[in-house]
Image (cartoon, rainbow, N blue to C red):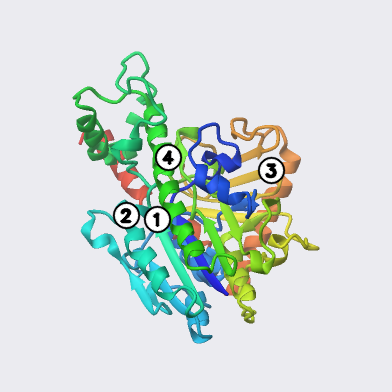
Amino acid sequence: MNVLLVSLDSLRADHLGLYGYHRPTSPNLDAWAADAVVADAMICSAVPTTPSHTSTLTGWTSLTHGLVSHRGGLDPRPGYPWVPSILHDHGFLTGAVDNIKRLLPWYTLGFEDYIDPSRRFRHVWSVPLEVLNQRTLPWLREHAGREPFFLFVHGWDTHTPYLPPADVRHTFYGGDPCDPACDTMQPFRRQYFYERSRDWLAQLRADLGTERPITDAGYLVALYDAAILHMDRHLADLLAVLDETGVADDTLVLICGDHGEMMGENDIYFDHHGLYEGNIRPPLLARWPAGGISGGRRIGELVQHHDLAPTILEAAGLSVPSAMEGRSLLRLLCGEGETDWRDFILTQECTWQAAWALRTQRHKLIAARGPSLHNQPARELYDLGADPGERENLYLDAWELAGELEARLESTLATQMAALGIDQDPVRHENISLGQRWFDWLEARARGG
């Protein structure tokens, strides 16, 4: 058997048709999902990219592997299990079409072929799946059917700046993005991230042939959706090569996002921070007909990125290292069900702001570890069944439930930290790698700088 793992950066689940989105952003993926298995409650182990991907291929939570923030160059905790190395040692040809090595140099370990086409781009986050396919499709055509392979592909189409090509750019927008009567960009303009977006916005104005400022935040949402549509076309090309080479049925395909993207909800615009659903709920789809994973089924259990490593190893018929914290999803994906599955998960952010969250099927408790950049309170509680948009903070009203969930969060962290020999919560004490720039910017503005 083979494994194809596709990570689509900054892709939130609820902007895909197969998750109920109102725009037709993902027709090819929707069609493919009809014979796949879809996870409805895939929740990030951590955000953003570096801790999330490290969890994906180690089977460890961010607390255990130690990468809790965006900061690059940091090695995981010694002794980490590493799926590419394990598979390579058991006869798999291992390949990656990716550029995370520019953030995490050790990421190439275990990959016989590590192909990075990003050097021609100004930023690591500017490499679309269309360009990756120029390397990926020939690799698959050369190797598929000749030897078992593990291939990791990481696309960035839906990461800011959203710049889908001209032929799809205005698919979902027909108005005037510079209409002064529709100034929904106003809240965004008071944020440091708006300052970071000036070059992107200037390019959009130039492409529109105007010097007027963009006023409609909905235009940027439509660009994000158009980026999904463009990516969807090239994802279809990638999946088609599996059919073309005759390996589609015996290839475990896992398609996921490393995290989502916020579109202005909870005051967070066009970025991936905060522990709200738009950011921590990416898609997860799986298909492997020869292994019993097909048929258009859905699973509702709480699953996370660190579950993917043991899933891949079990599917490959290999022993799962006892050190891995994730749980194999293989039986869930095959429709066999699992007894005693987890009833809550933890997730964290330590990038623009520092916080932990505990999420159950119904509720979410967010516990900040530092000041908020979006005027959010130190504690938040949401009923996701009644309030999926997370607009009503119930922390003070449902104080008994809030206290119960907070106690569970803190006791779980304390137990894990004690087992690791950690004295201090790293999310509290690690540098918020990007958010400090925002605080410095606010301080400079207060001084009149």
Using the numbered discs, state the Cα–Cα distance from disc 1 to disc 3 in whole angstroms.
31 Å
Does the rendering let one see residue 242? yes
Q: Residue at x 68, y 61 (%)?
A: 333
Using the numbered discs, state the Cα–Cα distance from disc 2 to disc 3 in whole angstroms.
36 Å
| SS at badge 2 | loop
| SS at badge 3 | strand
The picture quadrant where one finds residue 167 is top left
> Residue 107 at x, y = what percent?
39, 72
Q: Is residue 402 left or right of residue 348?
A: right
Q: Could you tell which of marks 1 and 2 lies nearer the N-terminus?
A: 2
Q: Please state which of residues 235 and 324 is positioned toward the viewer in this rendering.
A: 235
Q: Identify which amino acid the numbered label 2 is placed on.
A: Val
Q: Please state which of residues 210 and 375 is positioned toward the viewer in this rendering.
A: 210
Using the numbered discs, state the Cα–Cα distance from disc 2 to disc 4 in whole angstroms.
29 Å
Mark nearer the viewer, 2 or 4: 2
Tag 1–tag 3 contact (CB < 8 Å) = no
For the N terminus, the image quarter is: bottom right
> Residue 27 at x, y = what percent?
51, 42
Tag 2–tag 4 contact (CB < 8 Å) = no
Residue at numbered disc 4: 373
Could you say which disc has been placed on residue 139 in the image?
none
Q: Please state which of residues 150 and 28 is positioned toward the viewer in this rendering.
A: 28
| SS at badge 1 | strand
Residue at numbered disc 3: 363
Tag 1–tag 2 contact (CB < 8 Å) = yes
Residue at numbered disc 2: 127
- Please say if 103 is above or below 92: above
Q: Could you tell which of marks 1 and 3 lies nearer the N-terminus?
A: 1
Mark nearer the viewer, 4 or 1: 1
Could you say which disc has been placed on residue 155 in the image?
1
Q: Could you tell which of marks 2 and 4 lies nearer the N-terminus?
A: 2
Using the numbered discs, state the Cα–Cα distance from disc 1 to disc 2 in whole angstroms.
7 Å
